[in-house]
């Protein structure tokens, strides 16, 4: 860019790297701590930041295995972490798939099919999207409490109810996918129409294959959002075996039963896969996010 | 263009699918299933939900039946989902704000009457153990003390009345555990002794003559057996009341108009904390967005510096807080900040001899929440900022630098003004998100420490959303009505933010189009 004096530049470089390193040390401190805690004996801080007598006890418990201490006492896992993980992944996959299907079809319709009052619908969707589902928790509780009388499958403490509520997050994704469809050349669908394709066929054979990248972004985003949800799941799920990870994990740090070490191992075990998926997908996620949000 | 294509109908030859009968069967079956559900909901006195399902069934049949609405088929599922899962719950929450729905007024009117009339006083003199014997498809009840055996009964949940007659003990009796398994049937059974005394199930193991505590003596009227008082249903308070106004719980749900809002605005114990919670909510959301934006932008600028090496490594490490599921990081911080067992206080004490009370001091709790939230949120802002920084033309910056402007000045006069407009909608969205950031508050502090001297539990770190959550689902007895009323206030704020975002976005879009 502009000519800079080499000495200044070197100082600046040192300052920049120094700042980055100090900042990273601060930011990453919780991660180092959690790893250390997961190998530490017992469930309380012992005065040392690094474990003096590393033990695999917390890891055994996180995997749902009994652990025999050196003195012969057997410790049993406090909570079914793997079951919670399975619940979370199951609900996340099903709901994310539902969200994706609904959002893609709606986005195609909003982008291509002429419907009277479309602009009004779109504006309405945009405004509604700002109301998070968590605000309507009271109503959601009342609704599923009533639906439970029709069938326990749909009531409080069922995974079906959770999946249904999570479908509500389609609005944002309709926008993201619609932005993508809008950028596709209209001559493509004209060609399909001339060949005699119905709008459904155009969607199925022309748009769907083109939308695979944005659809994977939306899928990962929806999945992560669902896995991260605490309020909705905490209101709808009651029994320990039905819990998702987010609801269950909170039990570890109860004031009366404080399982800091067990929590650390469980947190790494459950957090790692999601983190890896996210890091792989993040490049696409952010571009999808900002573009979807800015395109009106 | 004809009206048909206006609605997006396909050309005539494509209209009849390959298997029209299959489609009609599926549409018909789905519609019927929904109609049945609607009828069932109506029957269990949930007419509102029934009506919703009915509307859904009608909409489904209309859109997927005739070909006229072909185009709408694509939009119907999405719009229906938005209406049912967002618009309806929002509207329903607002409606609940105008009712007295709470743990005291939980049931419907019909259920309240059922509950009250099913209460009874057991006459201890007639109480006696019973046993059940199988008899073909049904059962017989055997009362060993008075040596009476009943006619065969089916023991379904339906009300049944059978007579008892002296008899011999049946050869084979069910074990007590199997008898308990039949309790739904037993509870709806009335046995009539030869002396014309009615016996009912009075416990897991006994039958006795039971006098009902309340008898329905008329429309909206119950008579209390104990003192003969007549109770009238008060449809304004949602309770049965004696002439003196004594309320008999449980009550039912009734509309109470603006009562909840009056409570919010007039009761000092509620209004005081509400004002402080509102102020904190705005401050929390504002400071979080500002902090994340400033930090994210600074880091993005450093990362964009052409002379910096290891950019990719820095970038990945800086994103980590965003990549780890938030509920895990928040709980990790909850543990690290723990006053007695937390590692942060361990270090602070070793170095400075300090042991801050992160969870019991209101101010420190708020500081902690902001630290955690900025930790969680800055990577998102950084990633966005890196994208927007790239779109700032290099020659503008060069020109300014040639004129002798310092790099700080270049940043504030050239770069910042160019990235703010496209950033604005995202910042507003982030503000709205934090305004209702329930996950953070619920997992980190649950709103605590509590503000002293309030009528309802309200915490120093409570934001409006977590405050409503606690009102509805924790400690205070499920005050759904009051929670709904507060939610309406939140909705008004969110609507304002939402509209601001809409305007900002239109502007950003039109600016883009103008370029």
Image (spheres, rainbow, N blue to C red):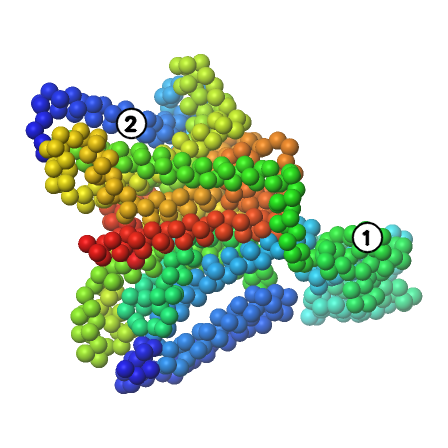
The quarter of the displayed image where residue B226 is located: bottom right
Q: Can the viewer see residue B239?
A: yes
Q: Farthest residue in the right direction?
A: B195
| Observer-nearest of B44 and B496 | B496
Asked if B342 appears above or below A223 in the picture, the reply is above
Asked if A221 appears above or below B363 in the picture, the reply is below
Counting the numbered discs, the total is 2
Circle nearer the viewer, 1 or 2: 1
- For mark 2, give the secondary structure: helix
**Residue assigned mark 1:** B245
- For mark 1, give the secondary structure: loop
Locate residue A67, reporting x and y percent.
44, 32
Residue drawn at 32 percent across, 26 percent down: A26
Asked if B468 appears above or below B24 in the picture, the reply is above
| Observer-nearest of B139 and B170 | B139
**Residue assigned mark 2:** A23
Locate residue B126, reporting x and y percent.
88, 56
Residue drawn at 77 percent across, 60 percent down: B233
Compared across the picture, whether B442 is left or right of B181 comes to left
Compared across the picture, whether B253 is left or right of A128 comes to right
Residue drawn at 36 percent across, 29 percent down: A30
């Amino acid at each position: 860019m502009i000519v800079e004096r080499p000495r200044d530049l070197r100082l600046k470089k040192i300052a920049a790297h120094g700042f980055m390193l100090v900042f990273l040390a601060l930011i990453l401190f919780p991660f180092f701590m959690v790893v250390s805690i997961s190998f530490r004996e017992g469930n309380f801080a012992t005065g040392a930041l690094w474990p003096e007598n590393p033990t695999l006890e917390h890891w055994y418990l996180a995997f749902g295995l009994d652990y025999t201490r050196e003195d012969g006492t057997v410790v049993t896992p406090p909570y079914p972490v793997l079951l919670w993980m399975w619940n979370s992944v199951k609900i996340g996959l099903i709901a994310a798939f539902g969200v994706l299907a609904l959002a893609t079809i709606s986005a195609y319709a909003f982008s291509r099919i002429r419907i009277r009052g479309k602009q009004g619908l779109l504006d309405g969707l945009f405004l509604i999207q700002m109301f998070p589902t968590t605000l309507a928790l009271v109503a959601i509780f009342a609704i599923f409490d009533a639906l439970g009388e029709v069938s326990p499958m749909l009531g409080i403490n069922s995974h079906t109810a959770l999946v249904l509520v999570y479908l509500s997050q389609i609005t944002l994704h309709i926008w993201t996918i619609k932005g993508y469809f809008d950028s596709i050349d209209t001559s493509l669908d004209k060609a399909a129409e001339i060949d005699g394709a119905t709008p459904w066929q155009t969607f199925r054979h022309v748009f769907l294959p083109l939308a695979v990248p944005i659809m994977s972004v939306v899928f990962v985003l929806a999945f992560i959002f669902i896995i991260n949800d605490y309020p909705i799941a905490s209101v709808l799920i009651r029994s320990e075996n039905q819990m998702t990870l987010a609801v269950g994990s909170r039990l570890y740090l109860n004031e009366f039963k404080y399982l800091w070490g067990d929590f650390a191992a469980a947190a790494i075990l459950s957090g790692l896969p999601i983190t890896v998926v996210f890091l792989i997908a993040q490049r696409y996620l952010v571009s999808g996010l900002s573009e979807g949000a800015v395109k009106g | 263009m004809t009206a048909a294509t206006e609605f997006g109908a396909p050309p005539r030859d494509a209209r009849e699918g390959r298997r029209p009968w299959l489609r009609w069967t599926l549409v018909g079956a789905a519609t019927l299933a929904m109609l049945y559900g609607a009828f069932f909901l109506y029957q269990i006195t949930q007419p509102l939900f029934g009506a919703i399902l009915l509307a859904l069934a009608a909409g489904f049949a209309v859109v997927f039946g005739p070909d006229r609405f072909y185009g709408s088929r694509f939009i119907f599922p999405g719009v229906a989902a938005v209406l049912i899962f967002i618009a309806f719950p929002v509207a329903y929450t607002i409606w609940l704000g105008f009712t007295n729905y709470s743990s005291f007024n939980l049931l419907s009117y019909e259920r309240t009457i059922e509950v009250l009339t099913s209460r009874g006083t057991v006459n201890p003199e007639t109480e006696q153990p019973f046993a059940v014997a199988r008899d073909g498809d049904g059962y017989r009840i055997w009362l060993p003390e008075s040596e009476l055996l009943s006619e065969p009964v089916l023991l379904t949940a339906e009300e049944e009345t059978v007579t008892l007659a002296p008899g011999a003990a049946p050869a084979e009796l069910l074990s007590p555990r199997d008898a308990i398994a039949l309790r739904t049937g037993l509870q709806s059974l009335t046995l009539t002794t030869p002396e014309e005394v009615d016996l009912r199930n009075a416990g897991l193991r006994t039958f006795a003559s039971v006098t009902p505590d309340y008898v329905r003596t008329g429309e909206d009227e119950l008579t209390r057996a104990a003192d003969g008082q007549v109770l009238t249903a008060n449809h304004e308070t949602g309770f049965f009341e004696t002439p003196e106004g004594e309320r008999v719980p449980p009550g039912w749900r009734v509309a109470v108009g603006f009562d909840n809002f009056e409570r919010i605005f007039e009761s000092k114990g509620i209004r005081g904390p509400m004002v402080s919670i509102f102020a904190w909510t705005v401050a929390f959301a504002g400071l979080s967005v500002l902090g994340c934006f400033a930090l994210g932008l600074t880091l993005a600028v450093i990362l964009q510096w052409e002379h910096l090496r290891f950019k990719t490594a820095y970038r990945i490490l800086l994103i980590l807080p965003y990549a780890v599921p938030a509920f895990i990081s928040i709980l990790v911080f909850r543990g690290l900040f723990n006053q007695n067992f937390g590692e942060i206080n361990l270090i602070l004490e070793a170095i400075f001899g300090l042991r801050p009370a992160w969870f019991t001091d209101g101010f420190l709790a708020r500081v902690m929440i902001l630290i955690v939230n900025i930790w969680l949120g800055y990577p998102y802002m950084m990633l966005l900022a890196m994208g927007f920084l790239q779109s700032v033309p290099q020659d503008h910056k060069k020109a300014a630098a040639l004129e002798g402007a310092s790099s700080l000045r270049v940043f504030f006069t050239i770069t910042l003004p160019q990235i703010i407009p496209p950033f604005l909608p995202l910042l507003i969205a982030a503000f709205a998100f934090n305004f209702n950031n329930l996950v953070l508050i619920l997992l980190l502090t649950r709103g605590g420490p509590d503000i002293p001297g309030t009528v309802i539990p309200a915490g120093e770190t409570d934001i409006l959303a977590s405050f409503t959550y606690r009102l509805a689902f924790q400690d205070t007895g499920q005050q759904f009505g009051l929670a709904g009323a507060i939610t309406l206030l939140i909705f008004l704020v969110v609507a304002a933010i939402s509209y601001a975002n809409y305007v900002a976005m239109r502007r950003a879009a039109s600016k883009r189009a103008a370029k």
